[in-house]
Image (cartoon, rainbow, N blue to C red):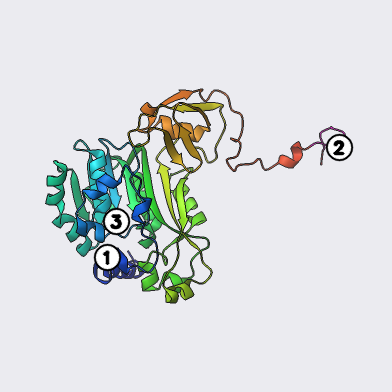
Amino acid sequence: MGDLSMQSHDVVKDYYGKQLQSSDDLKTDACCDASAVPNWLKPLLSNIHGEVLSRYYGCGLVCPTNLRGARVLDLGSGSGRDVYALAQLVGPEGEVVGVDMTDEQLDVARNHQAYHVEKFGYDNVRFYKGYIERLEELDLEPNSFDVVVSNCVINLSPDKDAVIAGAYNLLKEGGELYFSDVYSDRRVPKDVAEDPVLLGECLGGALYWNDFINIAKRQGFNDPRLVENRTLEVTDEELKAKVGAINFMSATYRLFKLPQLESDCEDYGQAVIYKGTIAESPEFFMLDEHHIIEAGRIFPVCGNTWYMLANTRFAEHFEFIGDFSKHFGIFPGCGGTAPFDALLSTSDDGEQSCC
């Protein structure tokens, strides 16, 4: 890595290892309020050691459902809050691996590992020191993880392409990258990107949302799905003046490693029925913000959504109607349009018009 990358890493290590002592020291409202945590997750968090919780700096919730027995990797695991929550979701037959580059954060996570073994009744957690841009340097087998998560960390990386590419390489086919991070509504200028406090506060390294979509697709993750998002407020007046008119959002995306996915949502006349059998979601299943699927109800889907449900760990929880034998064009309301719509318009007398 170049000097700029090392400088960025040093700034982040200092900020999260020495400058911040708890989430109360943050200068934005990036950290999720406890009231936003779903009810099924609250008992799991109550089992986690207090120091681990106090050193949590995430901007979202990275606990997807239906993880029993899964192998999960947490990129930028910090003090281990999400690792220990996920450890309870995957259970004794699963495993959670955390990767972080900051010694002080890793010390907190490891110092309380025995506490959590006793609390849970099993030991299914490992922590590695390493850089999330260089996952290939760690003892991690390619195509071996069901889920990769990350909580407000990828924005801190100087090489986001490498992070996304590394996650894709480690996921099994049908696995997913499920992560929360900070995004901007425009590209962040150099003076904001290089400000050490803004970088540490997850604003300096925020990706313009459209650049992120392009990176995801470039690294093999077609059709990124937005799960949820909220506007972030910069609460420190000095930092607010520095960022000016830039707007920042915390957002959770899920990206599936499915080579079958198309660049657009295509309509094959398919539908699914959710059985209501995922323990955390008995009444509905939320794939993303546009696909909230009520249990027992026929729900029309595009081909990509079909694959996201049929070729992943969710398959047993759905009934599937239809196949790919007949194509009906772009799925209505999914953003894609034909580039030559004007040619299909008609003249006033009902005849098709020509150029």
Q: Amino acid at mark 3?
A: Gly
Q: Residues within 10 Å of mark 3 (few under 14, many from 20)?
A: many
Gap in Å between the C-alphas at discs 2 and 3? 61 Å
Where is the N terminus found, in terms of image quarters?
bottom left
Residue where numbered disc 3 is placed: 76
Q: Amino acid at mark 2?
A: Asp
**Residue 293 coordinates in the image, percent (x, y):** 47, 34
**Residue 332 coordinates in the image, percent (x, y):** 61, 36
Gap in Å between the C-alphas at discs 1 and 3? 17 Å
In the figure, residue 316 lies in which quadrant?
top left
- Residue 88's place in the image compared with 98, above or below, is above
**Residue 180 coordinates in the image, percent (x, y):** 39, 52
> Quick one: SS at disc 1?
loop
Q: Residues within 10 Å of mark 1 (few under 14, many from 20)?
A: some
Q: Which residues are magenta?
A: 346-353
Q: Amino acid at mark 1?
A: Ser
> Quick one: SS at disc 2?
loop
Residue 22, disc: 1
Q: Is residue 44 magenta?
A: no
In the figure, residue 163 lies in which quadrant?
bottom left
Residue where numbered disc 2 is placed: 348
Looking at the magenta stretch, what is its main secondary structure?
Answer: loop
Q: Earlier in the sequence, mark 1 or mark 3?
A: 1
